[in-house]
Image: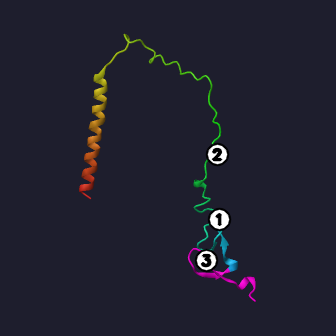
Amino acid sequence: MARTRNIIVECDVCGFEYRRTSMKLNSYGMLVCPKDYEGQYDLKNHPQNKTPILRKSNFIRDVRPENNNDRNILWEGATTNWEDTDNYWNTIWQLWQVKLLLILIKTYYK
């Protein structure tokens, strides 16, 4: 009759034989060797497979915007100076082109 410390069992994952004392049960109920044992996390009970606990979030009641005087203007008082906007975006475009050119030169002369 074999004692419990000398029992040889087969791993349900890899098929190798190990002593029963070194085997562990995973969350699927399979006897696995120490190399195949994934601890408390495996495909069944991994934290990412569980639904998050969503609590009621605190929100601010009666929210009002700040007093933005520049936004509260009438249509007649609005000025549309598109030339400044075009100059701004043209400057950004030129800087981007220079940066791209420097990158191309750097990669070409490596």
Task: Give the labeled residue for mark 1.
Answer: 27
How far apart are the two marked residues, 3 and 2, measured between alpha carbons? 36 Å
What element does badge 3 sit on? Answer: loop
Corner quadrant of residue 5: bottom right
Give, as a three-letter code, the residue at label 2: Ile
Task: Give the labeled residue for mark 3.
Answer: 11
Give, as a three-letter code, the residue at label 3: Cys
How far apart are the two marked residues, 2 and 1, measured between alpha carbons? 22 Å
- Judge the density around disc 1: few (<14), some (14-19), many (≥20) Cα neighbours within 10 Å: some
Task: Give the labeled residue for mark 2.
Answer: 53
**Given this view, does label 3 or label 2 mark the residue nearer the observer?**
3
Viewed as shown, does residue 102 lie left or right of 67? left
How far apart are the two marked residues, 1 and 3, measured between alpha carbons? 15 Å
Q: Earlier in the sequence, mark 3 or mark 2?
A: 3
Residue 49 lies, in percent from the top left, at: 58, 54
- Work out which quarter of the rendered image holds the N terminus and state it: bottom right
Residue 43 lies, in percent from the top left, at: 57, 61
Per the rendering, the mark at residue 78 is none
Q: Earlier in the sequence, mark 2 or mark 1?
A: 1
Give, as a three-letter code, the residue at label 1: Ser
**Residue at image location 60% in from the left, 75% down from the top:** 12
Q: Residue furthest bottom?
A: 1
Question: Is residue 8 depicted above or below 82 in this figure?
Answer: below
The range drawn in magenta is: 1-19
What element does badge 2 sit on? Answer: loop
- Judge the density around disc 3: few (<14), some (14-19), many (≥20) Cα neighbours within 10 Å: many
Viewed as shown, does residue 70 lie left or right of 57? left
